[in-house]
Image (cartoon, helix red, strand yellow):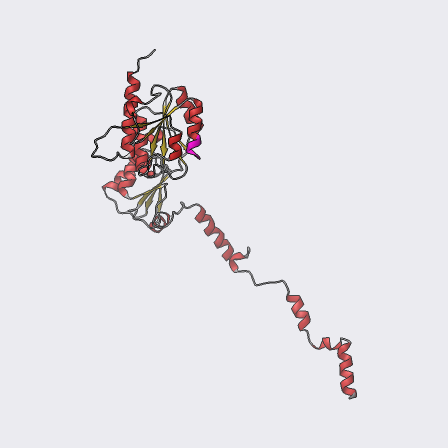
Amino acid sequence: MAGNSSRRGATSKGKGKAAGSGGRIRKSLEGRGPTPRAEDRVYHKAYKAKKAAQKHQSTQPRKPARGQVGADWVVGRNPVFEAMTAGLPVKQAYVAEGAERDDRLRDILKFAAENSVPLLQVTRAELDRVTGGLVHQGVALQLPAYEYADVEDVLADALDADGIVVALDGITDPRNLGAIIRSAAAFGAKGIVIPSRRSASMTAAAWKTSAGAAARLPIAMATNLNRALEQASKMGFTIVGLAGEGEVPVAGAPGIDGPLVIVVGSEDEGLARLVREHCDALISIPIASAVESLNASVAAAIALYEVAQQRANVPSE
């Protein structure tokens, strides 16, 4: 029909597009995306509130994982007071607002005031947050990160004095580490070398057990203990390893009157195979047959004492 023919012709020439505006509207909306949230619009008050909260959060102490206190935290009234009196370095001390005063808390506050320990009062909720929900009894200490010495510097200083360096192979208990540091300082060692992997580090427990010796004795962390022992050997150190099956008693250790590295093995497995290969001798402490072995820190203390005695008996030239 003529009418139908006319309508088809009009459509083919594009006149039919003016009947609707959907095509133009769709094009005008392309690429705009969803409306930004209020807190993402710089002119909105929600944005300013978000930035203020972020700034406040950045000034708060770092939160360790829940259920754990990191290496740089001490919590609880007795542990905090003991840490303070043991000479642990303190970055910041925290006390909860409204904490119940007892004799121990008064001791803490008095010690902080007399020794210029920075003390910050925070809400109990905030102290809960930063200590991972542990029982802090209203007080906590944050310790600064320990600054390890350079391995080469420790070896060089000991070499100049014909001194002793104690190297630890896999000591994983921080209390053993602290006890060895204390013994090393007591018997004149010049430094400690620990590996960066599979080893205890300078945590609050190690600091406390060292009874302040960690502040006086340089402690170096080696990326690779075997390379550190190779370096020591090239520098002129004699390297001896403590081992229960060692055939040489501590008193007869070679090089005992010169620069010496005493290697102490892990609590469970002793010296690793490669560490043994880097030793000039394996030395032992005679003990009763009924006892299988000694604690690592006890063995280190006995060996250091015996070496110190032998050195004292060496006639001077």
What residue is at 66 percent from the left and 66 percent from the top? 28
Which image quadrant is residue 241 in? top left
Can residue 212 be seen here? The reply is no
Tell me: 87 left or right of 221.
left
Residue 242 in the image: x percent, y percent? 32, 30
The image shows residue 250 at horizontal and vertical percentages of 29, 25
Left/right placement of residue 30 relative to residue 296 reads: right
Q: Is residue 146 above or below residue 65?
A: above
The quadrant of the picture occupied by the C terminus is top left
User: Which residue sits furthest top?
Assistant: 317
Q: Please check the rendered image and state whether residue 225 is part of the magenta-colored stretch, yes or no.
A: yes
Q: Tell me where residue 234 appears, x and y as whole percent.
A: 45, 24
130 vs 308, nearest the viewer: 308
Tell me: 234 left or right of 182: right
Which of the pair 148/196 is nearer the observer? 196
Locate the N terminus by quadrant: bottom right
Please tell me which residue is depicted at 78% across the width and 80% down the height of the picture: 9
Q: Quadrant of residue 266?
A: top left
Tell me where residue 163 sits by quadrant.
top left
Tally of numbered discs: 0
In this rendered view, identify the residue nearer to me: 155 or 268: 268
Residue 281 position within the rendered picture, expressed as x and y whole percent measured from the top left: 35, 26
Q: Is residue 60 magenta?
A: no
Tell me if residue 299 can be seen: yes
Which residue is found at the position 38% from the left and 49% from the top? Answer: 65
**Which residues, given as a range, are shown in magenta?**
222-227
